[in-house]
Amino acid sequence: MAQGKETPPNPSDEELVDMVLAGQITAFDQLVLRYQQKLYSVLYNMTSNHDDTNDLLMETFDKAYRNLASFKKQSSFYTWIYTIAVHKAINHSKRKSKTANNFSLNDLDPESGMEFQIPDASSAADPERQAHLKDLQIRLNESLQKLSEEHRAVVVLFDVEGMSHAEITKILGCTEGTVRSRLHYAHKQLKRYLEKFVQ
Amino acid sequence: MTDQELSKLLKLKKAETPGEVYFSQFLTEFHRYQRAEILHKPTFSEKLGEWFTQLLPTPRMTYAFSGCAALALLAAGAFALLPVKQASFSTASMAPFTPDQQLATFTTYADASHQQPELLPSATPERASTYVTGTSVGHYETVVTF
Amino acid sequence: MKRLLHSSFTLLSFYILVAFLGIAPVASADPAPAQGSFIDEMSSEISKIFEAAAPAVVRIQTSSEDHNLSGTGFFIDSDGTILTSALVVGNANLCTVQMGDQKYPALVLSVDTRSGVAVLKTKQTHTPFLKLANSDDVKIASGLVSVAYAYDRPVSPAFGTVAGFDVQFLNYYFATTHIRANLPVQPGQIGGPLLNSKGEVVGMTVVAFKDGCYALPSNAARRIVDEVIKYGQARHAWVGIGVKDSPAHVLCISNLYENTPAATSGIQIGDQVLKIGNRVIKSPSDILDAAFFARVGEKLPVEIVRNGKTLTFEFELTERPDNSRSVTPVLTPQGPQTMQVKGQQ
């Protein structure tokens, strides 16, 4: 417990960072719990691979922990940790593309543990439609992997995570114009890849 | 496919999760990972790499630095090698195709509208190669049809 | 009598001598085989197969706007015809073929995504090549030698055995039964040959997974190449029927497709498929193999059972609408319904 300070009931990210830097390292666990699902989502949508995502998630939190002292609070903790995660995913994909096609058979394995929660109520009672949607999701993952890492990142952050252009520029370190043009190109490419499979 | 349809499809991806069990155990696994990392003593080159990454935190700075370093290296190399004796070597195997050359003597089974392909410059692979593993399943079917 | 005794004795001595000469080498040999001699023999065999085949195996590199792809292929005749995986070629018209230290351009003759076969042609003549064996001779536990280029390393061998024959993997179907091999295949080795003990090709690797691979059998590859050479591309036969498997291995028609020979034939959803041509149908393998090896324009009889009655329908085979697309049926609760193939003109 930081001396002379009470722990607020619902500490902000920045307050948790201060607590960690003051020696209360278990405060970092709160940050992990807060961001594990969001960061998992970003990393998984970048890599389409559960094992890689798991590794990258560990590395992201570890890097954030080690570099907490250099978090200058110029941006929010949220932006800062997302930046770490996205760059790790981009570098990982670039390294991996030297060695293999990006798609792992694990991701096709229905027993691999991924829950494809299909939030389409009408399909829940309809196994054929569910199977079709699942197939479409697989194809979407493949199509995403065909994009370059930079294009994939903007699609994941904008379309999947729902971030604004401004937030994305902070994470990727590029201009809003670049974000827009990458999105435009990426959408065009995805539509091209997917139109074969969608009625 | 419209933009809205694509957008809707992409939003569905947020629902792809490994499930409650994974997340309930993640923190424990992360602690285990951190302990393993603490026990692992980084090598000098790992430390150097880490320092370098911190020195050049943005990709732009990294590219700029790499560019300058590459230029410096080229300049030093050029200086050291002057005067350079031109090595002679056979380029026969690398000779680019021109329309005058011999695609016509191929027994091309392709139809006549097949264009004369230009040979890609042999210096092409500056980009790293993807070594094919065959795990892209885009062309396989999920139903038995005949 | 003396003479008889003498001849017998001579004969006996002769037999003893022959026996001795026969036994002696065995007797003088070590009582137990030396440690590693079986391994030496095996290594020697694999080495022979590898040395003979390696000159005919090439690295294939393809460049596109997004990627550089690297895989393996092999010559199948002395005129520079190369077989490789469609995944190594993608949409390219031209590839680079590396033989030893030399690189040459290769024209893409055809990419057949349904079978996964791509056929290329280089300008080279008198190319060393590999013979395609009869893959029907391959059995479970047959030994296989792979010769291929992993990553950016020189061509290398691997040894394994046939583990099985599958037409289905995960949720996907191959176009025809594939060989599953317990043989390590590394990135870059897809498109490479799997060889039998005679150094002939029994398969071409198409999918690498942990600890093993799938290979397209050489008979299937030959069927595709023959059509590419005759017609410029392979054509897959099409009746217009979708079939569903059941745990009891009863295969019933689940879909009929519009504008196909099946649509107006009188064959119905729910009919159980018994035979296609001469092939008795017991599994999805049988159906897909029957279709794969049939030819467009042929007449194909299909025997079904409906309400205990056996009926035969004969179809003139048309060409499969689009080799690369999934045909997804529209929902059909019951009754003979026709479904639309997506994108069919």
Image (spheres, coloured by chain):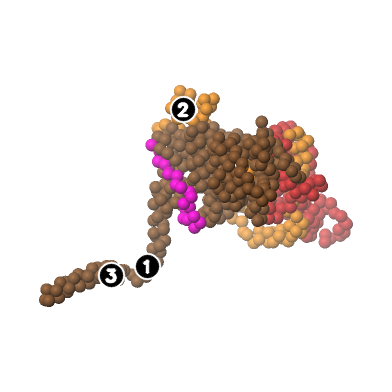
Chain colours: A red, B orange, C brown
Residue B12 appears in the figure: yes
| Chain letter belonging to callout 2 | B
Q: Residue B127, relative to residue C37: is it above or below?
A: above
Instruction: Give the residue pinned by disc 3.
Output: C23
Taking the spot 58% from the left edge, 54% from the top edge, the residue there is: C210
Viewer-proximal residue among B43 and C249: C249
Q: Disc 2 residue type? A: Leu
How far apart are the alpha carbons under marks 3 and 1? 16 Å
Q: Please tell me whether mark 3 sits on a helix, a strand or a loop.
A: helix
Q: Is disc 3 surrounded by few (<14), some (14 to 19) or many (20+) residues within 10 Å?
A: few
Taking the spot 72% from the left edge, 42% from the top edge, the residue there is: C336
Q: Is disc 1 surrounded by few (<14), some (14 to 19) or many (20+) residues within 10 Å?
A: few
Magenta stretch: give its range.
C126-144
**Numbered tag placed on residue C33 in the rendering:** 1
How far apart are the alpha carbons under marks 2 and 3? 66 Å
Judge depth for marks 3 and 1 and give the one in front. 3
Taking the spot 75% from the left edge, 55% from the top edge, the residue there is: B19
- Position of the N terminus of chain B, as image quadrant, is top right
Tell which residue pokes out farthest to the front in this image. Answer: C309
Residue C205 locus on image (x, y percent) = 52, 47
